Each structure stands twice: as structure tokens, then as C-alpha cells.
Amino acid sequence: MAVPTYKTEPLQCWNKAKEIRINFYKDYANAHDNGGLRWAGGAWSFGAIPAGLGDDVFPLTGEPYAASIAFDKEFSLRCLEAVEKKGYARDLCSYMRNYWGSIILNEYAFGGKFPKPDFIWQDHICCSHAKWYQVASELEGGIPAYCIDVSVGPHQELTENRIDYVVGQMHDGIEWLEKISGRRYDDEKLIEAVYEECRATSVWAEICTLNKTVPAPLDEKSMYSLYVLGTLKKHSKEVADFYEELRDEIKYRVENQIAAVKHERCRLMSDTQPPWGFLKIFRYLEKFGAVSVGSLYTFGLIGMWEDKEDGTWGPRTTPQQKGITIDNRDQALRILAEWNLSKPEWQHFYSPHLKSDMMIRIAKEWKLDGIMLHYNRGCEGLTVGIAENRLALIEAGFPVMTFEGNMGDEREFDEARTAARMDSFMETLGFELITE
Amino acid sequence: MILVGVDVGAKTIKTVVLQNGSIIAKGKTIAGFEAKENAEALFEQALKDAGISRNDVKHITATGSGRKEVVFATKSVTEVTAAAAGVNALHPEVRSIIDVGAEEGRSIRCDDKGKIIDYAVNEKCAAGAGAFTEAMARALEIPIEEFGSLSLKSTQEIPMNAQCAVFAESEVVSLLHAKTPLEDIARSVNDAIASRISSMVRKVGFEKEIALIGGVAYNIGFVDSLKKDLESDIIVPDDPEFIVAYGAALFGGK
């Protein structure tokens, strides 16, 4: 079989992405130095809301922090074992266990002691998230915590009552924030944060859309280092600006046929979080000329999407693009709530069929040859119904391989056997290892 | 044309020498800790048995979980493809292949040309592989070669409650203390493995004809349990343990 060859070059804005990420963790750790505030919560919590307390309010979002720990296998193992020693079950969410371990060991993944947050700002997206920060607070000797319940059903069934339910909690949350911080809340900062969040998350989706191109300008392993910024501070101007810069660079790569993988001849997608300690499996795929162009996870964890006029899936039109001006707190909160409730990765909590539909859509529009499903033992939320997704994808005509692992527990991933499964899968798709 | 297939499994290494499609020699040895050396020695012995030299061989194709140990191979193929190639050559009517070895099990669906449609692999759970039978045979203190025929003498069904091979051993000890006949326990073990394998087979779906290969195919009790579980006849080719090596050799000729 002839092997295509494309131009490749590294991303120009790669180092900037790394810098933004590192500064995020430094800013959080150093927040108190200048009288700032630290808060902790999930990456999907309504981070735009605490932004109304001031420009010196810095979050530590749990999942990307825990993924950073998981990437460091040695530190992760110490965290996990510390948690198990304390009596927590091994089959709990592995992000949560890595995070708790970091507290128990009092070690920050980015150096020094674990910086205790001033308050917790969370939402209950899954059973694990509902307990995660309760335990984190206990481990830290008690931290004020506020959680928003967002289980109002899939976006397509959203009603005004359901939005009111979420928005009501947001309003109460702002009063709570003022009380525990002693600060006066600034609605202008909230409004600005909502605009930026809409911009950042829409542009990320736009970037993902550009990967429909053959050859794909981005590979999923690289995308992990880019989408993560949206999980750190999606409401920040810095992240929104960066994504626009990245989008422009990706457009350039599309126009000039610059590929992520030099010999792209097989397009795949993955599912759920990857095994963070073993991202090399994506580089192994490249030896076959296979590129993972993304996944519902990479696209829809922070990206916001809508049906476009031509029937394709594309970036969601922002309020500002629609000419909507946000004038007041309630309007900002309603837009924020509805925007977040439309997140693709939130829908499948309600039905695996909703997820299957989105996955099949991606497989068709991104022109995939196959799908690799990570049966991720570390996340109940993103793997719920994955066996159903597999059946639906097969029925839709797509070859599927599965591999078992754990996004945050390296003890549950067998690298050699996963590679063996990939060998078999590539063979069945008709691709051998490329010898240069 | 002379082709050789070398299948380095978790426990044993098998080799098959083909001349113009016919088997002229085959051999088996324990893989052990020196699989590389053992594979080479087995290969050399097979050449000797066939009365040929290495220079006569067009391709040596390695397969199996330890195929990287066959450093002298000229080609490599996964067990999935090799199994399909081997079975298709002998039984082109087969559409579903079940391959159960010492530590792994596979279920493969293929078309009339042996092209793979879908497959599933279990390399995580010993309760669905030969290691389980071996452990239970040790627990019952009967030779593994007699395990299958003993189970066919069973007159009653004793469900095995344990999901795990480790816990199953405890359960077997309890059954022995309860004076449960050995043949009934043996049947219970075979039923348990068959149940796990069937579950994997149903994951990819199956259609007739069905073939069973791999070392566990010698266990006639397991074959009987599997037939009952799948409610279907099953073809067990001669020398089922060598089919993957055979398929690898055939692959080398493509």
C-alpha cells in the first residue's frame, strides 16, 4: 500500500500554551502573596462566577490538576497509595484519588506544599464530583464549600424552569461568595467572564472542526495540551485570546496542507480521557500512519457546538456574535447556565444513545476509519454506557477496538497488551508498520 | 515454497513448517524465561525434522504474544490474523473462531475469505483461559490430560459461584470437603470457563460454523460445555494448538 507523505512542522504557539498552563498553577499557589484568593473546584464548575470577586482570584480545577499528577507516574502512585492507606476504595474516581493523595501527602504537583484553597466552588456533574470536595474539605480541616446541582436533564429537554433551578443556585452562590470572601461582587467582571467563556469554548470547537481536513493539522495527543487551557480557566481573556491565535495558526496549516502526522493514512478517534501516564500509545499509532483526530471528549469537554445551516456540527455561535449585550447579573447567569448545560460531554450522563449519536456524527464528519474506545476504569461519568456506544458505532459501520485502562491509575494499564491490541486492530484495518 | 510459522504463546512455543501448503514438520516447546533461545532451538529442530536448511525457507513469520522474541523472523503477524488465516485454510465454512490459550482467549468473526470482521480479546482474566483449568487440575490432583474426560462423567451440575480463578480454588477446596464427586467439580470448572468464553463470543456475535482452536481445545469437557452454552456444534481442527502457527506460516506466503 502506498504511503502518503505530508509536510509537518511543530506548532508555533506550543510554548505559549505551556507557559499559560504553568503560570496558572503558579498563580494559584502564589495567590496569597498579594492578598488574592484561591478557590478549588471541578473544571466544569461555573468558574466565571468567582471571577466577579476580583482579578486576583485564582482557581485550581481538580481534573486537570489530577491529570498532571497522573502523568507523573511515580508521584501518582504515592498519592494513590496514600489514599488507599487512609481507607478509600481503589475503584473510586482516579482523578479524585490523585487529588486527595496530593493533599494527604501535602505535596503540590508543581512544587512545594499543597496550597489550601480559601473556598470550594463546585458543581455536581457526577457522583464522584458530589463527594470529591466534601472529602477534600475534610482532609484540609474544613473549607467553606458551595455546590451547584446541575442534573436538569439533557439540553434538548431544557425548560425555563430547569434553567431557573440552576440560575437560582447561582444567585445564592454569589451571595455566599460575598459573605465568605468579605468582598463586594462586581457584576461587570462576571459579564466579562461570561463573554470570554463563550468565546473561548466556541473557538476551541472551531479549532476541532478544522481537523475535519485531510491531513489533520492536529493530532489528539497534541490537542490534550491545548484543550486543557479551557479546563483551567475557560472564562479568562488570556485563554480566549490564545485559542484565537491557535485557530489562526491551524487555519494556516489547513491552507498549506501541514499535517500533524507525516504519513497520515488512517484516521481514528478515541474516547474518554486517555491513560495519562501512557500517552505514548498515540505516538505508537503514528508508526502505522494512524492519527487520532480527536474525540467527543477532546471536542466536547470544553468545546461548545451546534448544528450549522449546512447540517454539519460546528462551533456554537456566541451571544456576542448574535449581537446580544449582557446588561445585568441575572442575564449573565442565565446565559452562562444555558451555555454550559449544552456542553456535549454533559448530555451522555442522561443516555448513552445521546453519546452514540454524537460519536457517530464525529466519525462521519471527520472521515474516520476506526474508533478506539478506552474502557476507562477511572471515570464512571465518561464511561457510562460505553459498551452501548461500541455497539452503536459497529452498527453504523465503523470498526471499533477497545482497550482497558485507567486515566489516573497506571497500575490498571497494560502497555504491552494494549500495543498488541493496536497491532491487531491496525492489521484488521489493513495497515502495517511503516518502515522509513 | 517453504514457509515457517512460529507462535510464541504465554506458555508454549509452536512451530509449523509448510512446503507448498502442506505441513512437513511441526514442534512445540515450553516458552519459559528464555523464549528467544527456545524459539530458535525449536525452529532448528523443525528444520531438521523436515530435512531442510534455513536457506530453503522463504519466510519465517512470527506470531503470538511473544513474537518479538523471534528475532530471526522475516515477517510478523498478530494472533488474530494468523488464527483466521489458519482456520480459513482448513475450514473455509467457518465464520466464528474461538481461540483459547494458556493465558488469553480470543473470539473472531470473519468472512468467507478469512478477513476479520470483528474480534474481542481477553488477556486480563485467567478464569477465561487455560491457566484456570491447570490451576483447578492441580487443586483436584488430577493430570490435566484427564481433566476433560473426567468432567464428561459428571452426573450433576454444580454451579461455580466464584468469578475469579483465585477464589475458585477456594471454592473447589470447599467442594472437596463436602465430598463432591471429582467429575462434578471438573465439569463445574469447564462450565465456568465456557461461560466466560461464551460471553466474549457474544460480545462480537457469532455465526456458524464455529471453530475452536488453542490448547484448551484439547479439553473435551470444555468443548462439551461450550457447545451447550452456545447451543451449537463446534469444529475442532486436528492439532488445534498449532493452527495459529500454521496461519502465520500461510501469511508469510502472501
Image (cartoon, coloured by chain):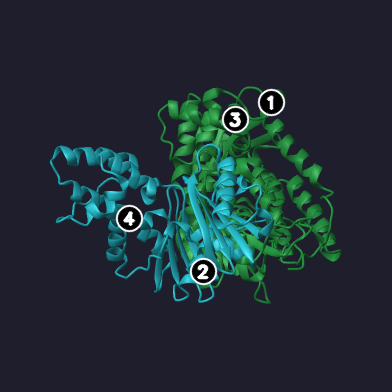
Chain colours: A green, B cyan
Q: Disc 3 marks which residue?
A: A74
Locate residue A186, reporting x and y percent.
Answer: 66, 42
In the rendered image, which residue does mark 2 sit on?
Answer: A394
> Residue A138 location in percent, x, y?
46, 28
**Marks 3/1: CA–CA distance:** 34 Å
Residue closer to the observer: B70 or A8? B70
Quick one: B49 or B211, which is closer to the camera? B49
**Is residue A327 shown to the viewer in this render?**
no
Q: Quadrant of residue A211?
A: bottom right
Residue A164 in the image, given as x and y percentages of width and height: 49, 56
Q: Residue at x 46, y 35 (%)?
A: A134
Q: What's under tag 2, amino acid-wise?
A: Ile
Subunit ID for the residue under disc 3:
A
Which labelled disc corresponds to residue A35?
1
Name the mark nearer the viewer: 1 or 2. 2
Task: Verify CB contact (< 8 Å) between mark 3 and mark 1.
Answer: no
Q: CA separation, marks 4 and 3?
A: 44 Å
Q: Is residue B34 above or below residue A218?
A: above
Label 4 close to label 3 by CB (< 8 Å): no
User: Is residue A74 depicted above or below A366 in this figure?
Assistant: above
Q: Amino acid at mark 4?
A: Asn
Q: Would you say the residues marked 2 and 4 are in contact, meaning their CB atoms lie under 8 Å apart?
A: no
- Amino acid under disc 3: Glu
Q: Residue furthest left?
A: B179
- Residue B54 lies left or right of residue B167; in this view the side is right
Residue picked out by circle 4: B219
